[in-house]
């Protein structure tokens, strides 16, 4: 058992186990129009890793068998995958609930003019990164112009009904601008609603707070600032056993752009596929082996259990 599993053992038996697959998270590739300083995947316009259609076909087959509650598309910027629309259309045709994690600014890239309407007409749920309601903080993380582009994109989505129509949820994502934990989610949601509402008339469904993982580009930034050890200690010292039952790896499976299976997107970053005997590629998917698999954990997992906890769906407690 590693140190994380020892802490978890206070709540669980021998290690961390999944209890089902409610969400199939699919990483469509690492190409992104942005290059954010906190990106654990180190996505950028220069990355070439892209999920091919042949892997998407396998996922469609598996999704039909598993019938999970949600197919969650992420990247990079998932919209930049050349087969994005075909994949979304086929998933929706087969009755799956589809969610896309968008960085918003990609919707203003050349060739994306029809994308908001496409998402709406396919009733795709949206989770959009908006790391702060203040311009300077967004600029620091995502570069100049990112704030204005994000606001423009949200306004376009609002005009289509996103953020007000219950069938078209638009959840915003906050992540800290440095090596500290997110503030309480519900209080921050009120701040976002007030500030973005008063300044721009923006509407959104919920705010999700996500802890920065000390991986990828954020880890390099911590190293440059000599903060990595302090931050790792903060995450460890903030271990909250109440978060363990809700850890996302327990009800989710991640598929990498090449079809490799992971317990979560962070393990994908680290190149740690599912293990302990579970099949680790979509082509050899076996429901029973993956349903109750033992999760591959490590030091980074303390990022999910610190304070109120963190997951792709926001705080855990
Ligand atoms: S954090 Fe998101 S938007 Fe930023 S570079 Fe990474 S994938 Fe792209
Ligand atoms: S990093 Fe991944 S495997 Fe570790 S606790 Fe978080 S979701 Fe689970």
Image: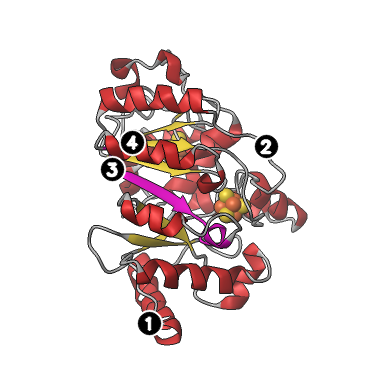
Task: Quickly name the residue at label 4.
Answer: 91
Residue 132 visible in image: no
Horizontally, residue 48 falls left or right of residue 106, namely: right
* Percent x, y of residue 193: 36, 77
Q: CA distance from mark 4 to mark 1?
A: 36 Å
Q: Is residue 66 visible?
A: yes
**4 vs 3, front mark:** 4
In-front residue for pair 151/3: 151
Structural distance between the alpha carbons of marks 1 and 2: 39 Å
Q: Which residue is mark 1?
A: 194
Figure colour scheme: secondary structure
- For image coordinates 54% across by 28% down, the residue present is 52
User: What residue appears at the point 27 percent right and 33 percent down from the top-left corner?
Assistant: 94
Q: Position of residue 7 (x, y in %)?
A: 42, 38
Badge 2 is on which residue? 48
> Is residue 207 on the magenta stretch?
no
In the rendered image, the vertical position of residue 212 relative to residue 51, given as above or below: below
In the image, which residues are magenta? 96-108
Lower position in the chain sequence, tag 4 or tag 1: 4
Which numbered mark, 2 or 4, is in the foreground of this view?
Answer: 4
Camera-nearest residue between 297 and 230:
297
């Amino acid at each position: 058992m590693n140190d994380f599993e020892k802490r978890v053992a206070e709540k669980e038996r021998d290690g961390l186990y999944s209890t089902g697959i409610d969400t199939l998270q699919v990483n469509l590739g690492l190409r992104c129009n942005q290059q954010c300083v906190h990106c654990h995947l180190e996505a950028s316009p220069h990355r070439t890793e892209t999920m091919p259609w042949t892997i998407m076909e396998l996922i469609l087959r598996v999704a039909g068998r598993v019938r999970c509650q949600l197919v969650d598309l992420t990247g990079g910027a998932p919209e930049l995958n050349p087969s994005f629309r075909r994949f979304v259309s086929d998933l929706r045709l087969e009755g799956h609930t589809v969610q896309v994690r968008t960085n918003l600014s990609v919707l203003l890239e050349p060739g994306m003019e029809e994308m908001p309407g496409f998402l709406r007409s396919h009733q795709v749920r949206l989770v959009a990164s908006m790391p702060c309601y203040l311009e300077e903080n967004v600029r620091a993380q995502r570069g100049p112009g990112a704030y204005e582009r994000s606001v423009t994109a949200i306004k376009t989505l609002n005009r289509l009904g996103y953020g007000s129509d219950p069938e078209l949820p638009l959840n915003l994502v906050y992540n800290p601008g440095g090596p500290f934990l997110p503030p309480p989610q519900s209080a921050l949601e009120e701040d976002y609603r007030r500030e973005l509402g008063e300044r721009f008339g923006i509407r959104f469904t919920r705010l999700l707070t996500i802890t920065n993982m000390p991986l990828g580009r954020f880890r390099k930034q911590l190293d440059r600032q000599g903060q990595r050890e302090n931050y790792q200690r903060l995450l460890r010292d903030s271990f909250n056993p109440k978060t363990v039952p809700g850890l996302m790896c327990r009800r989710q499976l991640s598929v990498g752009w090449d079809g490799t299976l992971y317990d979560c997107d962070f393990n994908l970053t680290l190149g740690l596929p599912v293990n302990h005997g579970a099949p680790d590629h979509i082509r050899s998917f076996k429901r029973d082996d993956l349903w109750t698999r033992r999760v591959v954990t490590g030091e980074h997992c303390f990022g999910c259990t610190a304070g109120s906890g963190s997951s792709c769906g926001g705080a855990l407690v």
